[in-house]
Image (tube, rainbow, N blue to C red):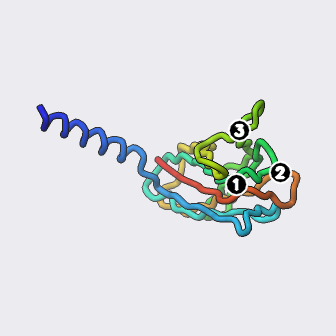
Amino acid sequence: MRKNNLLNILLFISFILSCSNPRYSNYYSFDDQQWFQDSSIVFDFNSSKSKKLKFEISVSYDNNYPYQNLYTSYSLIDSKRNVINSEMIELQLFEKKYGYPLGSGVFKSFVIDSTFLSIDNVVQDEDYKLLVKHSMRDKSLSGINMLGLTITD
């Protein structure tokens, strides 16, 4: 009985770990917690053996961020410099009515994750770039600490 429980737990853990194995994960830290409007954050990655990819953005922010949301624009570019996908997305960082921070974190630092793109027809073993920039009116945003990208199958 005890061996069966242990075996079931190990199988469950291995299943969970196999499902959430990222193909690519990288974070960019902003100097002095300032994200300038004219600077694009570039994530370089290879599609490897995948045909389907799911993209998740992570934003680390603090209470010094002056707005409740964040507009970002991204462009996915292949190795031949063709734009595969380009779009503006909105991330809600603070609750609209009461203003409390969304995502996970404690005290003054928080992280919010959002899946923003799924592509089914990726060319295998090709290099790609994902360019991300903020689309807010300010030339410089304070309170944004890091920007992360995680790509899974």
Q: Nearer the viewer, mark 1 or mark 2?
A: 2
Identify the residue under disc 3: 100
Neighbour tally class for label 2: few under 14, some 14-19, many 20 plus, Cα within 10 Å: some
Q: Residue at x 52, y 54 (%)?
A: 123
Q: Real-space Cα distance between discs 1 and 2?
A: 16 Å
x and y, in percent, of residue 27 in the image: 59, 61
Q: Secondary structure at mark 3?
A: loop
Q: Secondary structure at mark 2?
A: loop
Say the numbered circle drawn on residue 136.
2
Q: Residue furthest front?
A: 107
| Mark toward the start of the polypeptide (1 vs 3) | 1
User: Given contact means CB atoms under 8 Å apart, are the residues at marks 1 and 3 in contact?
Assistant: no
Neighbour tally class for label 3: few under 14, some 14-19, many 20 plus, Cα within 10 Å: few
Neighbour tally class for label 1: few under 14, some 14-19, many 20 plus, Cα within 10 Å: some
Instruction: Tell which of 8 and 87 is nearer to you.
Output: 8
Q: Residue at x 82, y 64 (%)?
A: 38
